[in-house]
Image (cartoon, helix red, strand yellow):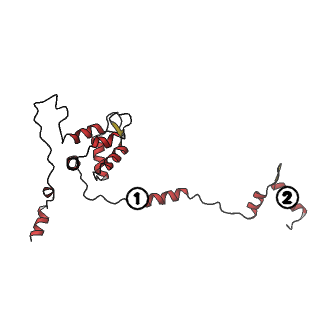
Amino acid sequence: LHCTEPEMIALEAKFCNDTGFNYIAFLSELQPQDPPKFMYVSRQEEIRQTNKRKTLPELNAQKDLESILLKVKTKVSRERIRVLEFMRDYDKLRSGRMLKISFRRALDLCRFELRQSEMSILEDKYQSCQDPDFVDYVKFCDEMESIFTTKELEKTPLEEVTPFKPPEEWEMNRLNPEKQNRFVA
């Protein structure tokens, strides 16, 4: 370093402390560098935008509760699914309630092929009175089991029982009048 004695004294006065000469402060002033950018927030936003694009619009999603229940009941009737067996695994305390996310998982395990919006409608219908984050799955299971038998029939033996008849597939495949006219023409 080519400097005079007074310049050296000035450098020592500026960069010396009780522990010695502070080379890091000296070099940062000699060759200033831009601090590295904090990239975490921008990277997190990029990931959020990428994940947002992956969700596809739902096709043929049912909009009303009755059609969703008909869809589920038909599947339960045809495949003889015991819905309570899938739901019970997520209720360790046997309280009759489960978290909404666990309800979705159980519905997926039942292979009902429900869309996200359909599951949300079912969650809203069977939402627990005590806690809005929970679903009363026992009510849902009772509704599904009602297609096989009426609950507590032994208490009302004279009640008229009407069995659930799933709609025939050809009845469900109807064309609206506009498409029917286009097909005929």
The answer to which image quadrant residue 34 occupies is: bottom right
Number of other residues with Cα within 10 Å of mark 1, as a class: few under 14, some 14 to 19, many 20 or more: few
Q: Earlier in the sequence, mark 1 or mark 2?
A: 2
82 or 59: nearer the eye?
82
Residue bearing the label numbered 1: 52
Q: Is residue 91 above or below residue 174?
A: above
The residue singled out by tag 2 in the image is 10
The N terminus sits in image quarter:
bottom right
* Residue 47 against residue 129 in the figure, above or below: below
In the picture, measured across the screen, residue 176 lies left or right of residue 116, that is left
What is the residue that sits farthest to the right in this orientation? 5
Give the image quarter of residue 132.
top left
What is the number of the mark on residue 84? none
Name the amino acid type tagged 2: Ala
In the rendered image, residue 92, in percent from the top left (x then y), is placed at: 38, 36
Q: Secondary structure at mark 1?
A: helix
Looking at the picture, tell me which residue is in the foreground, 25 or 70. 70
* Left or right of 18 on screen, residue 118: left
Q: Residue at 11% of width from left, 40% of height from top?
A: 162
| Above or below, 175 relative to 16 | below
Compare residues 34 and 84 and report the one nearer the observer: 84
The alpha-carbon separation of the residues under discs 1 and 2 comes to: 59 Å
Q: How far across and down, in percent of the image, does residue 141 sit?
A: 26, 40
At 47% from the left and 59% from the top, the residue drawn is: 47
* Residue 19, x across and y down, in percent: 82, 50
Amino acid found under the numbered disc labelled 1:
Lys
